[in-house]
Each structure stands twice: as structure tokens, then as C-alpha cells.
Amino acid sequence: MSNTDIPTEDEKREKLIEYRNSIDNIDAAVINMLAERFKITQKVGVYKAKYGLPPADKDRESKQIARLRKLSENAQLDPDFSEKFLDFIIEEVIHHHKKIRGGE
């Protein structure tokens, strides 16, 4: 940076590129983690279908939401956002479980 601590246009661009590269790496990690999660939930869906278990488990969902909210608070992330995110994932998992079972 220059003596006045005001970044040049090139420095601003470079810093944004640095931040965006970090975001891109995190996004890739999130997608890979979600893919792994869904591989396991597919196995759960097959298991539930095989043994006649219901696609949804409200008790488990409630516990997961409470756990995720606590993790979010500890990570200084908005717990409401995390709950919405988990709700979306749970909804998708249940949809997959119903398809596996032949219900959709």
C-alpha cells in the first residue's frame, strides 16, 4: 500500500481476488461435504425402506436443529439462517427417502 494507507486500484483488485478465491475454495468444500452427506442419507433411505421405517423422523430433526443452532451460535453464525439451511436439507432428504420407498 502507499504511504497514506489507501490502497491503489490494483491493490483493491488483488485483495478482492484473494477474498474471492477463498470463497471459491470454501464453496467447493461445502459442495463436497453436502455430496458426502447425501451419500449417507441415501443409505439411510434404503435402510428405512428395507425395514419399513418412515421417511421422516421428527424427533431426530428437532435434535439436529437444536444441535445446529448451538453450533451456529458458537461459530458466530446466525442460528436462524442455519436452521433454514438445515430445514432445506432435511426436506430434500425426506423427498429422496420417499422416492426410494416408492412414494413419489
Image (tube, rainbow, N blue to C red):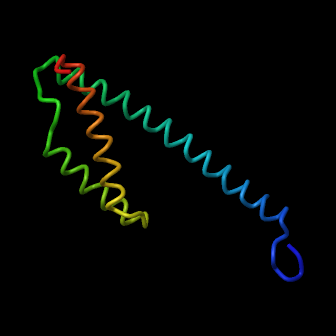
User: In the figure, residue 69 lies in which quadrant?
Assistant: bottom left
Q: Residue furthest right?
A: 3
Q: Can you say whether 6 is above or below 45 in the image?
A: below
State the residue at coordinates (27%, 40%): 90
Q: Whole-percent x and y of residue 77?
A: 42, 63
Q: Whole-percent x and y of residue 38?
A: 37, 31
Q: Nearer the viewer, residue 57 or 89?
A: 89
Q: Quadrant of the C terminus?
A: top left
Q: Whole-percent x and y of residue 64?
A: 25, 49
State the residue at coordinates (25%, 30%): 95
Q: Whole-percent x and y of residue 19?
A: 67, 57
Judged left or right of residue 41, residue 59 is left
Judged left or right of residue 13, residue 51 is left
State the residue at coordinates (15%, 39%): 57
Judged left or right of residue 87, residue 81 is right
State the residue at coordinates (35%, 49%): 85
Q: Quadrant of the N terminus?
A: bottom right
Q: Residue furthest bottom?
A: 4
Judged left or right of residue 26, residue 16 is right
User: In the figure, residue 28 lies in which quadrant?
Assistant: top right
Total count of labels: 0
Q: Can you say whether 59 is above or below 47 in the image?
A: below
